[in-house]
Amino acid sequence: MSNTASSPATTSASDLFEAGPDTRTLDAQLLYLRLPVMRRHALELSRQASSEGWDHLRFLTHLIEIEARNRHDKSAQRRIRSARFPVLKNLDTFDWNWPKKIPRQAIESFLTLGFLERKENLLFFGNPGLGKTHLATAIGYAAALSGKNVLFANAIDVVNRLQTAVVTHTLPAALRQYTNPDLLILDELGYLPLDQNGGDLLFQVISARYERASVILTTNKVPAQWPSTFNNDAALASAILDRLSHHCHSIVLEGESYRTRKMQN
Ligand code: ADP
Ligand code: MG
């Protein structure tokens, strides 16, 4: 196998190479096949196998398992990075006793990700500081860990990005960024009003995902207030809400902002 020396995989010395001529072929082939974790652990694991009397199959299973686990962990880390969560959150750090009203069981059930398989949306309603972004991130994090492509984006940032893409004639590619992921988390809809063009662009994202892939939306505006977010275009607001809420779970949070908790205690 003469091309192994030019393999782009890591060529740092390994115990397998150092062990002597007998193991150099295996070392070169693991390098060629791009199995760096097996290459790093083969010798040590074979010694463990001898001392503990493992049969061949058990040794092979262990060796392949460490490579597979490493690959799985790396791709999960890659998916978490590309999801662009502002801060990583999970439900372990969530204080369920803080909000006055919160559907805990429903929220915990979303971690099993059935809603994603069914292409359902989750709509989080509530005043600022109640944990909407925290909960949406925790669910998105679970989805990324399970192998789904997730994108977290602030609603205003999405609109700004799409408006820029219109100017640079790159709208189709920009739209794909928001329509391709298995899960799009659209955070903070309603915090700032959108102009007509911005609303139309957001509509394109929502309607492209409709019944195809899930959206998690967080908003501080109840549906009756949506027209004010969409430049008082009640028809557009209801067209967006219609698509989002056709197959959805609405989660309404009530209570005081968690951010002010320390001031009160
Ligand atoms: P919202 O999106 O509803 O405005 P956030 O999710 O951004 O609220 O919450 C604000 C801050 O308070 C975040 O740091 C979040 O992690 C924290 N937080 C909110 N609610 C809770 C809670 N019940 N338990 C623990 N942390 C919380
Ligand atoms: Mg938020």
Image (cartoon, rainbow, N blue to C red):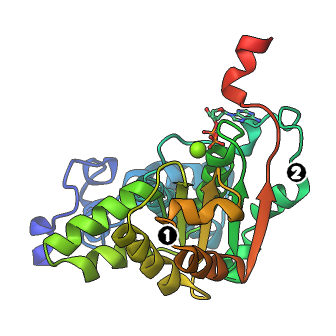
Front in this rendered view, residue 44 or 77: 77
Residue matched to label 2: 104
Q: Quadrant of residue 214?
A: bottom right
For the residue marked with disc 2, what is the amino acid? Answer: Arg
Callout 2 touching callout 1 (CB < 8 Å): no
Mark 2 → mark 1, Cα distance in angstroms? 25 Å
> Can residue 220 be seen by looking at this rendering?
yes
Seen in the image, is 97 located left or right of residue 235?
right
Q: Residue at position x 65%, y 59% from top? A: 225
What element does badge 2 sit on?
Answer: helix
Count all numbered tags in the image, as a single digit: 2
Seen in the image, is 259 located left or right of residue 176?
right
> Can residue 180 be seen by looking at this rendering?
no
For the residue marked with disc 1, what is the amino acid? Answer: Asn
Query: Residue 256: x percent and y percent?
Result: 78, 31
The relative height of residue 170 versus residue 226 in the rendered view (above or below) is below
Quarter of the image with the N terminus in it: bottom left
What element does badge 1 sit on?
Answer: loop
Precedes in sequence: disc 2 or disc 1: 2
Q: Quadrant of residue 251?
A: bottom right
Query: Residue 29: x percent and y percent?
Result: 28, 71
Residue matched to label 1: 149
Query: Residue 118: x percent and y percent?
Result: 72, 83
